[in-house]
Amino acid sequence: MKPSIIKKASLKSFYIPERCHIKEYMNEAPCSIAEARVEVGVTTVLHALKGVDELYYLLAGKGEVEVDGQILGEVGVGDLVKIPKNTSQRIRNIGTEDLLFLCICVPAFQMEAYVDLEA
């Protein structure tokens, strides 16, 4: 990894079929970091990541997290959600503003790891 600064303003947001908007900060060993934005009232697609542990760090809004078929509870700013590899997951925006959180994947996210459990 080379020393660098990644400015949020330089990142492009793109919509993904998981029903959220993504800004990718980095995707290289040992991890990937992206910002996810889920609109009010939206629930992301139930999915799992093969061989990838994931952390959600909440930046704005309020959500309800489901992991491995169980509602873990409500989350808000400053909360951290730990999601073990190969585990079903989704998050629902239950607030009145966009839900914004960092997705940190170890090892770095690769599309081949994504399993859509609603397909």
Image: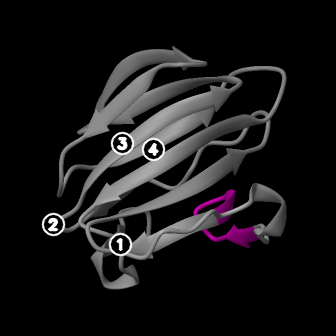
- Taking 23 as reference, is 18 left or right? left
Other-residue count near label 4 (Cα within 10 Å), few / some / many at <14 / 14–19 / ≥20: some
Please say if 84 is above or below 27: above
The amino acid beneath tag 2 is Gly
Q: Give the residue at x 58% y 63%.
A: 18
Closer-to-camera residue (29/81) = 29
Numbered mark located on residue 114 in the image: 1
The amino acid beneath tag 4 is Arg
Inter-mark Cα distance, 2 to 1: 10 Å
Mark positioned earlier in the residue sequence (3 or 1): 3
Numbered mark located on residue 55 in the image: 3
Looking at the rendered structure, the secondary structure element under dot 3 is strand
Mark positioned earlier in the residue sequence (4 or 1): 4
Mark positioned earlier in the residue sequence (3 or 4): 3
Q: Tell me which segment is drawn in magenta.
A: 14-23
Q: On the rendered image, what quadrant is the N terminus found in?
A: bottom left
Closer-to-camera residue (39/77) = 77
